[in-house]
Image (spheres, helix red, strand yellow):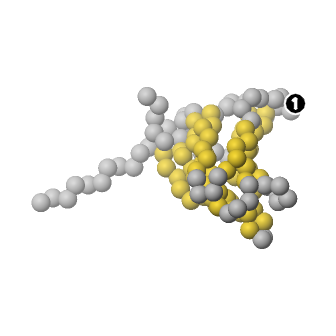
Amino acid sequence: MPIAAAPPPAQVASDSRSAVVCVRAAGPRPLFFTGKLVGKKPGATFPGDFELPLKANADQCNNLLRSKVADWTLSVTTPGFKACYLPAPEFGYRVTYSAKATARGLACAPIAKSPIGTWK
């Protein structure tokens, strides 16, 4: 009996227009997932900024759209700690990060990444 070959990995289009970024919190401190569109030209402001509370052991996700005139800055914050900055979103992917406030400060790390597929 022949063994079926695994399907090829999903391809991400280089012109993907969206990304999904999720953060999973750990620990008792209140954490917040924040995002802001920063214009490429000084003085420009854009809608779309967000601040979402995180719940322990639950993913908080946000869909981010690509912009030609602004870039996303993403961070996890909590009062009294220096913010943990997340890398710019990879459009066409769903990326999940863990966030935890420890005695050494706020720590963030990627834990999962997968393609989100094409829009239908």
In the rendered view, would you say 50 is above or below 103? Answer: above
| Residue at the image position 58 percent from the left and 36 percent from the top | 18
SS for tag 1? loop
| Residue at the image position 53 percent from the left and 53 percent from the top | 113
Residue annotated with mark 1? 43
Toward the bottom, the furthest residue is: 103
Would you identify the image quadrant in which residue 36 lies?
A: top right
In the rendered view, would you say 38 is above or below 1? Answer: above
Would residue 107 be found to the left or right of residue 17 on screen?
A: right
Q: Amino acid at mark 1?
A: Gly
Along the line of sight, the residue nearer the viewer: 117 or 33: 33
Residue 65 shows up from this direction: yes
| Residue at the image position 56 percent from the left and 59 percent from the top | 111
Toward the left, the furthest residue is: 1
In the rendered view, would you say 40 is above or below 28? Answer: above
In the rendered view, would you say 45 is above or below 57? Answer: above
| Disc 1 packing (10 Å; few <14; some 14–19; many ≥20) | few
Locate the N terminus and report the quarter of the image it occupies. Answer: bottom left
* x then y, percent, for residue 115: 48, 45
Would residue 91 be found to the left or right of residue 117 on screen?
A: right
